[in-house]
Image (cartoon, helix red, strand yellow):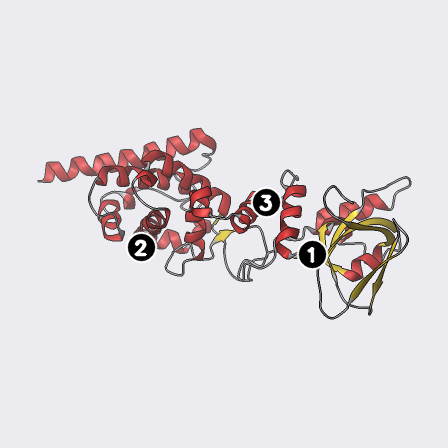
Amino acid sequence: MSAGREVFLGFAPANVLHALSFADVLDEDTGRGYQRRFNSAHSLDFRRYIQQANSSTIPLTFNARKRTDGAWHLERLKAPYARMTIASEGQKLFTQVDCQHRLGHLNDLSLMLPFMCFIGLTEREEMEVFNVINSKAKGLSTSLLDFHDATLAGDLASERPELFIALHLNNDRESPWYRQLNLGGHITSGLTRRASLRTMQKAIKRFLTQTKILQKQRPDVVAQMVLDFWSSVALLLRDGWDNPRRTLLCKGVGVYALMGIAGDLVTEAGPAVVDKRYFSNKLADFILEVDWSNSGPFSGLGGEAGVKAALNVIRAKRGNGKLRVISNG
């Protein structure tokens, strides 16, 4: 027993364990899987280490998911012993719950390694175990942990509305952020991720705190409101939006600052209808005057102070625009 769950403990050559297992990496297009992208450099570091004299490792952790084809079979012998039988070679039967990078580059080594295999966990249970083991792991994407939270949550809109709204931006086909947030898994070749899921959900959390909008509106209504805001931004700043690497528009400082402006506009709206038309009309008065280039006033800004400075610059542009309209009237 490993605490409250039964496990199979054993030893096997590294190349055998490699041949029989796979890492269930998150596919951002389908939403299947839950692990981070493979880091070859990290894995090669372990390969170099494990071949040194007196090296060792904690047991590699797998799960034998339930199957109906008899690909693996567990025979219980006299306690505490058991025998696991693999029906045929060449099948990757076991998921690498906690050993992806230790095992990744050991496919040609016959080093004997200890392993622990859970028996029959579902994919959801497996994800829960992985999340607990790796939630503080160095190098594990915080966005991937957010994705785990979203998958495991019973009522995400109530439990973590900022994450619910951020995922709405990423998943809604009408959103300019559609499939543009980096979740920490495999990314379809050719697509450019503009920002991380963690950056967006933290910026939205600031917006929710600033406006207290959830005291008056449901999370799904607010999610559409935020989508409308970003649609207006993408429409008005089309050149920068289409060339994200040349601007800071979709980088951390830009995302945080713009969500601050969204907070200003929502707060000022009062009982007025807040939709794409509202945001477009308000943003058109000043947003084109802001220099979003990599060499502009936001260059080098970061952290809380950087976001505050960027937000002040944008608010100043907006204030100047209002003064001009008044004087021309």
Q: Residue at x 46, y 47 (%)?
A: 156
Which residue in the protein does label 3 denote?
A: 141
Q: Secondary structure at mark 1?
A: loop
Q: Amino acid at mark 1?
A: Ala
Q: Amino acid at mark 3?
A: Ser
Indicate whether 184 appears above or below 305: below
User: Which label was assigned to residue 123?
Assistant: none
Query: Measured from the top left, where is residue 252 in percent x and y?
Result: 46, 41
Toward the viewer: 28 or 297?
28
Which residue in the protein does label 2 denote?
A: 235
Q: Nearer the viewer, mark 3 or mark 2?
A: 3
Q: Are marks 1 and 2 in contact (CB under 8 Å)?
A: no
Indicate whether 51 appears above or below 18: above
Q: Nearer the viewer, mark 1 or mark 2?
A: 1
Query: Measured from the top left, where is residue 4 in percent x and y?
Result: 72, 44
Query: Measured from the top left, where is residue 311 in percent x and y?
Result: 35, 34
Q: Is residue 119 left or right of residue 189?
A: right
Tell me the distance, in whole angstroms, between the alpha carbons under discs 3 and 2. Answer: 30 Å
Dot 1 alpha-carbon crowd within 10 angstroms: few under 14, some 14 to 19, many 20 or more = many
Specify which label sits upstream in the sequence, 3 or 1. Answer: 1
Q: Is residue 296 left or right of residue 90?
A: left
Q: Nearer the viewer, mark 3 or mark 1?
A: 1
Toward the viewer: 195 or 68?
68
Tell me the distance, in whole angstroms, between the alpha carbons under discs 3 and 1. Answer: 16 Å
Dot 2 alpha-carbon crowd within 10 angstroms: few under 14, some 14 to 19, many 20 or more = some
Which residue in the protein does label 1 denote?
A: 23
Q: Is residue 139 left or right of residue 254?
A: right
